[in-house]
Structure formats: structure tokens, C-alpha cells
Image (cartoon, helix red, strand yellow):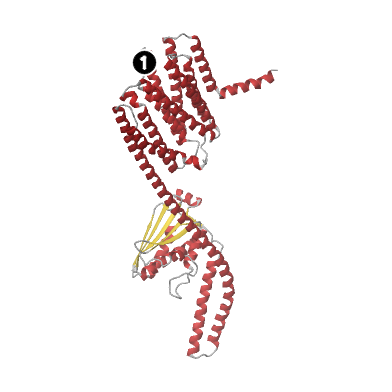
Amino acid sequence: MNLRLTPIKWGRMSLLSRHRWFAAAAGITLAFAGVSLFAHKGFALTVFADLAGLVLMLAGASASLSNAASRPGPQRSFWTLIALGLSLWISNQAAWCYFEIFRHREIPDPFFFDIILFFHVVPLIAAVAWRPDILKKQARIHLSLINFLMLMGWWIFLYAFLVFPYQYVTLNVRIYNIYYDALFLAENVLLIAVLALAALTCSGAWRRVYSHFLAAQVVYTVGSQFLDRAIISGHYYSGSLYDLPFIAPIAWFAATILSARKWDLPAVEFKLVSRWKKLVPQLAMLAILSLPILGIWTLLFDKSDVPSRVFRITAVLCAMLLLGAFVFLRQYSQDQTLMSLLGESRRAYEGQKQLQNQLVQQEKLASLGSLIAGAAHEIDDPLHAVMNYSEQLWSKERLNEQQTALVRKIVNQAQRTRDLVANLLSFAQQAPGEKTLVDLPVLLHRATHMLESRRPGKVQVRVSIDDNVPRMQANANQFFQAFYEIIENAMDAVEEAGGGSLEILVQRHGSEVVLRFSDTGPGIREPQRVFDPFYTTKPVGKGTGLGLSAVYGVIRDHGGHITCRNKPEGGAEFQIVLPLSEAAHTAGASG
């Protein structure tokens, strides 16, 4: 028997533990109802009712601030706005406590803190409209915030336009209560609509949050109508059953906020229907267009006294100035967003173009390498025969001077062709060389000194190498040949320009090593073709057009990439970016 009851008992305890705050809220509501039913009207009941509402509001605001401190970005804004709305509500309730408990007076009508009570709903609407359950781009966040501020500014103007003239300009309690109650009801209905939309378009724990807030707000909105009627008819007193629809929603709000501390509230991607996306901007534009209409109505049809009409015209002009500033800010934000998108699009296009060029270059090298490897082997054998037979003819036959000169030319051209075939075979070799830890500065200095010794005084070479450049996992011979080729091409270009300088800069950027070869020569005629096989601007017989193609293959084989460009001030610049391997990192750390 006990074995059967134990799981049921634990299940009930677990259910009660999960919903303990809502159970507490229900208990508080029932206790308040019991006191209201059986306690007599008097000072003690007033103290109980006013302090009960104040304590519940303080609990909800404190829990909201706690949630704001422990939650990430967008959620922090949501809970901060909730706390702000509840804080405004607390100030109104504190004013009630001051008048009824400490001064033993009834609340005056109109009451200054009615303004605070009215505007406490604004941060709540802002919190729900913020929609922390939806992932948003930064630019969209700014536009949504500006549009919402425009609507809230219009809502504040509407209060000043309709209610304020009868509250402080020319006192008229009856009309003041009519306009205030109608506008306060519209404000609460707007909050219900925003909560309903949020609850319908979200999922998971966020739906629980919005649904609980929605139900509590519906109870509060309906109950406040009965409470207002009771105040007008003179049947209301603090602690009566009319306060029950006021205490229950506050307890419900507080229970939801406290329970949300344990709920997983992730933000997800969500795409609203296009007409819903345009709703807030359209409402903002309607709010702006309504201002001149209300101004014209005040001038032509408003029958109130002169001070009230003057105040309304002033409110319209101030609202037009404020909302006009928001329109300018929104347009500026949209322009900045558009410029940012254009910049991102341009960078993405350039990156895609560069990647495409690299892929095309790799395909060129791969296909050409296969073709060259086969053709070079076929050409090498006939060349070898031509050279052997020419040498035999030269050494064994008695030839005159003209014939001897022709045979020598045949041998020289055959040797030149054989050297070209050797270069082709070297270029076409697909197998990567053996890689060890090499010192890039040593290879650079060796290649530079070797070339400078052949051209003394013609080109000034400056080498600048950071101290934190580690040794790299690479093939030393291939890297030496690559550096030699780049430096030789740069020196040829500088000599062609009549002299100049070559600057070599080596730096470490995080997990990469960047090498820059910058010369003061005439620049590159076609930078986009410089790595193409057989592309050369040198005279016939001086260059094969395979050197930089081979360099490109070496750099790609080591996981890096090489680019070239013409500098705005003149000359060309080659840049090599090489990744550091784990072995290089270890060597750098140990060094």
C-alpha cells in the first residue's frame, strides 16, 4: 500500500514545488478575500490592504531587478523595463499609503500620482514590445526602438492633450475622470493586445511568461473598471472586495517573475508576416499625421476655455518638434544601416571574387601541371638525342666555320630547351617537399644577400623583422626559392625604373605570419594575371613566366596565400600570409 502511495505523494510535492510561487499567490489572494469579507471597514483594514499591495509590488520589482542582473543582453532590458513599470506603480501605491495611513485622509481627486499610475503601463508595453524571445540584428534593434519611442511619445502627448487641461489648467473633476478613465482603459487594452500577440507568436517558457502576464493584465483591466465605478458611486473603501482584482493581478505578476528565474528563456529566430513588420512604422507615421489634425481641431472646433486651447496648441507644437526629431533620427539610422549593408556587400563581393580567383588559379595550376608533366617527359628524350647527335657531328666531322657556328647554335638552343623542360618538370611536380622547422629570417637574409652581391648599389634593400616571429614548419628549399623569385622580380622592376628601394617586412599577427615585399618600381601591368603560368613581361629568353606560378603553388602547399597589388604611391607590393602550426607555436613559446 505504501509503495503505491509514495510515487503519488512525491509527484504532488514535485508539482507543488514547481508552482510554489503561483500557489503562494493564490493563497495570498484567498487570504485577502477572507479578510475583506469578514473584517469591518476601518483604519486597520486600510493599513492591511495598502501595505499588502505595496509589499507585493516590492516583491515583483525586486525579483525583476534580480532577473535583470542574472540574464543576458535583451532579457536584461526586458526585466529592467518590467522593474521600472512596477517601480512607478510602487510610487503611486506609496502615495496612497502616505495619505491613508499617515495623514488619515482620503485620496484627493484629481491626484498628482494619477499621472504616475497612468505612465507605469508605458514601460510594461515597451518591455513586451521589445520581444527578447526573438533574435534581432543590431540595426533592426535601433529602428524598432526609435519607432516605439515615437509611439510612446505620441501616447504621452495624448495624455497631455486630453487629460491635463482638466487636471491643472482649468480644473473640471467630472470631465477629467471621464477622459482619464477612458485613456487608462485604452492603455491597458493596448498592453493586453501586445501581450496576446507575443503569447501567440512565441514558444517554450516565453509563452508561459507572456500568458501569465496576459491573464493577470486582463483581470486587472476588468477589475479596475468595477473599482472606478465603485469610487464614483461612493461604495469603495480600501480593503473592500473591489481591491481583490487589484491584489490578485499583482500577486500573479510577482509569482510569474519569481518563477521565471528557474525557466530557460532562449531567444530564437522568428519571421513575422510582412504586414506585422510594417505595423509599428505605420502606426508611428499615423501618430505624426494626427498631430496637425488635432491642432486644426483645437483651433476650429474646441469649445473649451482659452487657457485650455492655448495649452493644447502648445502640446501639439512640442509633440511635432519631438516626433520630428525622432523622424530625423530614424532616417539617419536607416541611412547608416544602408551604408553599413553596402560596405558589407562590397567586402563580401571582394572576398568572394578573391576566393574565386584563388580557386581558378589552383585549377589552372593543377590541370596545367598534369599536362606539362606528360609533355615534358615526351620532349626530353628527343632533345637528349638532338644534343648527342649534334655533339657527335661537331666532334667527328670536319665542318667549316659556318657549319660549326650552326651546330653550336643547335646545341645551345637544345640546352636552353632542356633547361626549360627541367623547369617545367620542377613546376609540375605535385608531391610536397619534406617540412621541418625553418627560420624565415635566415632564408630571407640569405636570398637578399645573394641577389644584392650580384647588383651592388643598384637597389637598396631594407629588411625589418619582428622579434616574436617563430620558426615555422616548412620546406626550407622551396621557401628559399620562393623568396629568391619574389626578391629577384622586385629588383628587376626597380632596376627597370632606374633604381630605387625594396622593403621587406615580416610581422606576426596572432596565429599568422605576414610577409610584405614592397618596391618602388613601375608597378605590375596586370596584377590579376601575375600568378598565371607562362605570363611574363620580361623579354623573350629572359623569363619563362613560371617563377611566380611556382611561388603561388609553394605558398598554397604550406596552407598560406599570396596576393599582389599596385600601391597608390607607385610600385608593387606582394603579401604572403602563412599560418603557424602547433609545432611553430611550441617552438615560439620555448624560444
Viewer-nearest residue: 273 or 441? 273
What residue does disc 1 label? Answer: 99
Instruction: Please give the name of the residue rendered at 55% of the width and 33% of the height, measured from the top-left corner.
Output: 204
Viewer-nearest residue: 551 or 152? 152
Instruction: Please give the name of the residue rendered at 49% of the width and 83% of the height, measured from the top-left corner.
Output: 409
Q: Is residue 492 above or below residue 404?
A: above
Q: Position of residue 366 (x, y in %)?
A: 55, 64
Q: Position of residue 347 (x, y in %)?
A: 44, 53
- Residue 465, picture quadrant: bottom left
Viewer-nearest residue: 287 or 479? 287
Image quadrant where one finds the N terminus? top right
Q: Position of residue 12 (x, y in %)?
A: 61, 21
Query: Horizontal placement of 94 versus 71: left or right?
Result: left
Viewer-nearest residue: 9 or 552? 9
Instruction: Please give the name of the residue rendered at 67% of the width and 19% of the height, measured from the top-left corner.
Output: 5
Label 1 Cα neighbours within 10 Å, binned few <14 / some 14-19 / many ≥20: some
Instruction: Please give the name of the residue rendered at 53% of the width and 90% of the height, measured from the top-left corner.
Output: 398
Q: Residue reaching furthest right? A: 1
- Residue 171, picture quadrant: top left
Residue 543 visible at all: yes
Q: Is residue 558 above or below residue 314?
A: below
Residue 315 visible at all: no
